[in-house]
Image (cartoon, helix red, strand yellow):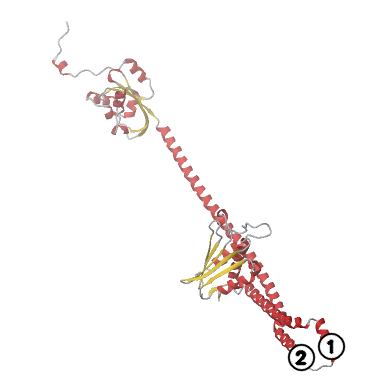
Amino acid sequence: MPSSPSPDDTARPAAAPEVPEQVRRLLEGSVDAAVVVDANLKVLYYNAPYQNYSGLRAKAIERAQARGGCCRDFFRLEICATECLVRRALETRRAVRIDEIRATRADGQELTLIVTASPLEEGLVIETYRDVTADARIQRKYKLLLENERRQKENLEQMVAARTEELRRANEELKRTQAQLIHQEKMSSLGRLVAGIAHELNNPINFVYGNVDFLAQYMRDLLALCDVFDRSDLPPDTRRLAETHKRSIEYDFLRKDAEKLIRSIRAGAERTASIVRDLKTFSHAGGADMQPADVVAGLETTLNLIQPLLKNRIQVHRDFDPLPHVLCHAGHLNQVFMNILTNAAQAIVGEGHIWISARLKQDRVCISMRDSGPGIPSEVLSKIFEPFFTTKEVGLGTGLGLAISLGIVRAHGGSIEVESPPGEGATFHIVLPVHRPER
């Protein structure tokens, strides 16, 4: 018959579930740390690697077990502050694995573990810990190296992009400077040539223009003498001979046409003298210093020179306000007007119109030149000021006109912009300071 329990036996709590022997043998042979706990997180069994992780001696662990200490008292995981893997495994009845959990041994050494909680029968859970501290450290270093490499690559790409942009701008500036030097040398040579030609033309034109009035007076005197003979009583033979000669030379027509010829000679001489003056004005580059100049007079001079492009085909509409003189290189600005107005005239097919306006806004002169041509396509509008860019056929344009114009206007402290709505022609806006630009 069974013996009756002693008073000590009745006060003792129910015995904890036994850990199966096969589980003990399996965990004893494992290189991973392992611990078996019940539903109350009480440690029932642990292997030697677990003791090493805890940093406690065996007797200290036994005393803690006797006091009913839970697994957190022996070896605390970082995740224990927010979640219990043992309870999750018991609730789901499935193994739970968490990678790279941080933990701290009792001696202060930090570890990185792979923790697996696997439920057993009778409410037991095996929790195993695999040390991947070295691997995690290598992985972190590898990630750090990859991040550094990525940043260095990004920095290098940014440096290359910045350097490429810097080289592109320097190349554009070099092209623009080269174009300006070529233009300046060409204009200097052309200016000297035109000035020489104008000077050579000026003498004979002055000779013609200065003598046309004498020629007119001589013709009037000769015709007056003929009138005297016509009113005189001449012998019949002489009269008959004179009349015969007058008919042979068409005297009446000659008398009327002579006045027209003299007027035509005078008008031609005046026109030629005006062209010579315009050529001298246009080709005059001036010295190193800027001089006050009338930009409206420069526009008129330019229109006179491109008259062959406009004559009987293009009507020019002028709208000029009274303007002060602008401190500038007049010859250079005339070149800008020439480039833009020539392009406008060449863009108009058949008959058309050009509108030119000049306004004073505060201390700046604003000049607008608009044409009735087809306009500039949007895909090339941003490129028209680039050196050597042209939409004209080979031999008809160098692509330097507008690039040089942009450089000239900027050298005067001004700006030049263009707008071209589809099918509505192109409008160039030039803004120039009245006074010397600040350096």
Is residue 27 visible in this depiction of the protein? yes
**Disc 2 marks which residue?**
225
**Measured Cα–Cα span from mark 2 to mark 1:** 18 Å
Instruction: Kindly identify the residue that appears in the image at 54 percent across and 56 percent down.
Output: 422
Q: Amino acid at mark 1?
A: Arg
Instruction: Work out which residue is located at the far right of the displayed protein and give it.
Output: 237
Image quadrant in which you'd find residue 352: bottom right
Instruction: Work out which residue is located at the far top of the displayed protein and give it.
Output: 1
Image quadrant in which you'd find residue 86: top left
Instruction: Kindly identify the residue that appears in the image at 66 percent across and 75 percent down.
Output: 275
Where is the N terminus found, in terms of image quarters? top left
Q: In the rendering, which numbered label is found on residue 240? A: 1
Tell me whether circle 2 and circle 1 mark residues in contact (CB < 8 Å). Answer: no
Q: Could you classify mark 1 by the number of other residues whose Cα lies within 10 Å: few (under 14), some (14-19), or many (20 or more)? A: few
Q: Nearer the viewer, mark 2 or mark 1?
A: 1
Image coordinates of residue 285 in percent, x first then y, are: 62, 72
> Which comes sooner in the sequence, label 2 or label 1?
2
Q: Nearer the viewer, residue 304 or 389?
A: 304
68 with respect to 160 (left or right):
left
Q: Nearer the viewer, residue 91 or 381?
A: 381
- Residue 27, compared with residue 252, is above or below; it is above
Is residue 289 visible in this depiction of the protein? no
Instruction: Kindly identify the residue that appears in the image at 44 percent across and 38 percent down.
Output: 143
424 with respect to 97 (left or right):
right
Image coordinates of residue 265 in percent, x first then y, are: 71, 79
Image coordinates of residue 341 in percent, x first then y, are: 60, 66
Q: Could you classify mark 2 by the number of other residues whose Cα lies within 10 Å: few (under 14), some (14-19), or many (20 or more)? A: few
- Residue 144, compared with residue 382, is above or below; it is above
Q: Amino acid at mark 2?
A: Leu
